[in-house]
Image (spheres, helix red, strand yellow):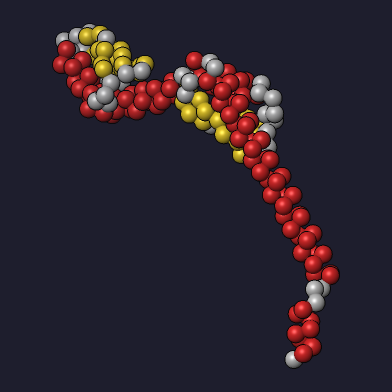
Amino acid sequence: MKIGAEWLGKPNTASTTILAIAVLILSVAGAISLALADGEAALMNQVNAALRSNDRLNGAKAYTVAEGVVVLYGTVFDDKDRALAEQTANAVPGVTSVVDNLRTKTGKWFQEEERIDLQLQMNGFNDVQAKVVGPYVYLSGQVTSQADKQRAANVVGSISPNLQINNMIWVQPGSMF
C-alpha cells in the first residue's frame, strides 16, 4: 500500500508535460476558432451593410458558412437585382465565393401566372391568358360571350382571391352557323 501512496504523491513529469501540451493546443485551437468565427461574423456584417447600401437590394441578406464563403438569401425584385446582389457581395474584401439562394418577386409572379393559366385552360378558356404584376392580374384574350368573360374572371378570383383582377378579355361573338 505504501508504494501506491508514494506513487500518488510524486508527480509524473511525462504526464504533466503531456497535459500541459494538450492544454496549450486546445487553448490555441480555441483562440483560432474564435478568431475565425469573429472574422466570419465581421465578413457577414460587411456584406449585409453593402447590400443595405443599395435600395434595390433591401430584401437580400447574407450569412457565412466558411471562411470567405457567403450565402445570399431573401427576395429581390428580378434577375437583374439578383445579379447585382451577387456582384455587391463579391466586391466585399474577404469574400472568396458567393452562393446565391435569392428568390425573385417576378419569379413568384410567373409561378402564379402558370397556376392561373392552367386553371383557365382546365375550365375551357384556351384563348385567355393571365399576366401577374404585384397584386394585380391582367386577363387578356378572347371569348365568345360576356358571360364567359365574367366566368373567366370568376375562375381567377376563386384560385387567387388576393389579386385584383383587370379583365381586358375581348368578347367576339361566335358565328351563328
Image coordinates of residue 86 in percent, x first then y, are 60, 23
Residue 32 as seen in the image, left or right of residue 158? right
Q: Residue at x 77, y 90 (%)?
A: 2
In the rendered image, the residue lying farthest to the bottom is 1
Position above or below: 101 against 15: above
> Which is more toward the observer, 151 or 25?
25
Corner quadrant of residue 98: top right
At horizontal 80% and vertical 70% (from top left) the residue drawn is: 15
Farthest residue, direction right: 14
Identity of the residue drawn at 64% across and 40% down: 37
Residue 171 in the image, given as x and y percentages of width and height: 22, 9
Q: Is residue 103 visible?
A: no
Taking 30 as reference, is 51 above or below it? Answer: above
Q: Is residue 21 left or right of residue 135?
A: right
Number of callouts: 0
Query: For the N terminus, which image quadrant?
Result: bottom right
* Residue 128 versus residue 66 in the image, above or below: above
Front in this rendered view, residue 107 or 99: 99
**Occupied quadrant, residue 89:** top right
